[in-house]
């Protein structure tokens, strides 16, 4: 493969994700320049054909498209600061985690220096970078997305522009990502239940996989109930879930496992019942999660 | 289809799941007898070809295989009690939720009356009954499973015998099912974040679907870490998750949403760090979920 008609790309930040991004660009034949605060991380990429920029100024000057994959937006601004003047007219794409407010601040800084700005998120692990099914979504300057869509799809075939607001990727990232820790703790608790019986946790994985697929299959219905505000025709009611919480203590006893992390979840169910949602869909829990508009 | 060479089946309990089970047997050509405490629920099944047993004694006498799908094991025993003498030599399969201890008690009662007992769980919604991919798992008398495996597969193509212990399905059900409420609350919280911005929650569903698929893809690794007790080569460390909890407050502010249900999850992360697991895999959280063996 040659990079003759592929856009030159600079990748800034060579942690496990940044390294995977740079590799994907190299493999797809893009002239790829890399930069990292600690330079040794560039070596394996140089061996594959990347150019190592000694300074951030060189890194920015090398390409019309700069992908920054540092830990935070603050790190990104600090790294780019010496080259800020060179950002004018270039496309800057950030791919790190952070809050919507942080993404807005990053966007203001970048456009303030004349950059065309896009903020994105990768909904997957580094090993999935480049796969046709891997999802990346972006918010910000639509012209950057349109101009570089083919290049961005090198990182994952399911590449989406959410809208012109610079914080949309961070917003969706926050909204979508929040299921991870609670779902994992539920899995680890289940793992403890099996371990207490001397069973291998691996035996549970195919069943959990089916269970998460089942959860996936019902989310469109819950989303529709929430969007319409109609919780009255439930697939599973709050009361059914509340009845299920009686198992929690048995679960704790069966496996000698600490189930107290579930207490606030069960309290949410009780508050929903108190608010009149007992026979409503479990999706009505959103109504007790929302705080009143104005609290003193 | 005729039922000439299909095993006669009795289905006891015609809630939404029991009705789906009976329909699957009728559709597959099994002579199907149905019974419900409130008889009117049998009518639509009789219209499809089922026989309605007026009494529980008739229901049990009608088939060598009896599938009970009542709400609890207690309900099941109460319903079957008048026909207990007729259970001898028959195969009784329970498909309801309950704790492992309750499943053991149910098994002791059933075998005490001479029944051959199998306890199972359906890892899906009623609409999925009968699909080739639908998972049902069973624990208990292996000879019942072997004799009726083809019949049981009418309810779902992915039908598994976990082992001879009567409480294994309830145990796995508890272990696997525990991810549901926490994962859903995470989703509803994310939905509130989007709603606060005037975005449709439906726009988030395809992204959440990919995210749950990503979670599925990493569970085998976590299971392996737990089974081996080796948390030292982490894909995602406890410290990385703990750093991520800083976003919680921003999330609460961004959307005016109550994020306090996350407090005990974050406390688990902190306790794991205190126990020396900071740089270990997030799967090491299981070690802080497990309570000490002997507590006064």
Image (cartoon, coloured by chain):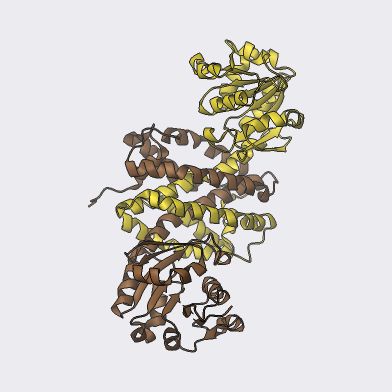
Chain colours: A brown, B yellow
> Whole-percent x and y of residue A161?
39, 62
Q: Where B80 falls versus B230 (above or below)?
A: above
Which residue is at a point 53% across and 32% down the rendered structure image? B126
Q: Quadrant of residue A96?
A: bottom left
As drawn, is B132 to the left or to the right of A159? right
Q: Where B243 falls versus B136 (above or below)?
A: below
Q: Quadrant of residue B274?
A: bottom right
Number of marks in the rendered image: 0
As drawn, is B263 to the left or to the right of A200? left
Q: Quadrant of residue A253?
A: top right
| The N terminus of chain A: image quadrant | bottom right
Is residue A44 visible in this depiction of the protein? yes
Is residue B264 visible in this depiction of the protein? no
> Whole-percent x and y of residue A277?
36, 35
> Whole-percent x and y of residue A234?
41, 34
Residue, far front? A5
Which residue is at a point 41% across and 42% down the rendered structure image? A222
Q: Where B114 falls versus A194 (above or below)?
A: above
> Whole-percent x and y of residue A283?
40, 41
User: Residue B239 versus residue A175: which sits nearer the camera?
Assistant: A175
Which residue is at a point 52% across and 34% down the rendered structure image? B127
As drawn, is A19 to the left or to the right of B197? right
């Amino acid at each position: 493969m040659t990079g003759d008609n592929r856009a030159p790309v600079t990748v800034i930040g060579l942690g496990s994700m940044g390294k995977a991004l740079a590799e994907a660009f190299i493999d797809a034949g893009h002239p790829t320049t890399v930069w990292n605060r600690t330079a040794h991380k560039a070596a394996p990429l140089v061996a594959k054909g990347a150019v190592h920029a000694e300074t951030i100024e060189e890194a920015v000057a090398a390409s019309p498209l700069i992908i920054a994959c540092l830990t935070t937006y603050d790190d990104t601004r600090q790294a780019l600061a010496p080259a800020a003047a060179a950002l004018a007219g270039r496309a800057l794409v950030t791919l790190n985690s952070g809050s919507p407010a942080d993404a807005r601040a990053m966007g203001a800084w970048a456009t303030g220096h004349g950059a065309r700005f896009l903020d994105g998120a990768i909904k997957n692990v580094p090993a999935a970078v480049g796969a046709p099914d891997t999802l990346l979504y972006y918010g910000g300057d639509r012209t950057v997305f349109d101009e570089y869509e083919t290049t961005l799809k090198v990182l994952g075939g399911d590449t989406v522009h959410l809208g012109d607001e610079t914080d949309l990727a961070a917003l969706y990232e926050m909204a979508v990502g929040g299921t991870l820790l609670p779902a994992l703790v539920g899995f680890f608790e289940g793992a403890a239940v099996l371990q207490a019986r001397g069973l291998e946790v691996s035996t549970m994985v195919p069943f959990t996989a089916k269970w998460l697929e089942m959860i996936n299959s019902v989310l469109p219905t819950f989303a529709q109930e929430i969007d319409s505000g109609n919780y009255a025709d439930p697939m599973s009611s709050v009361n059914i879930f509340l009845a299920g919480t009686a198992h929690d203590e048995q679960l704790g006893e069966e496996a000698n496992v600490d189930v107290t992390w579930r207490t606030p979840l069960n309290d949410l169910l009780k508050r929903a019942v108190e608010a009149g949602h007992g026979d409503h869909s479990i999706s009505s829990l959103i109504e007790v999660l929302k705080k009143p508009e104005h609290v003193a």
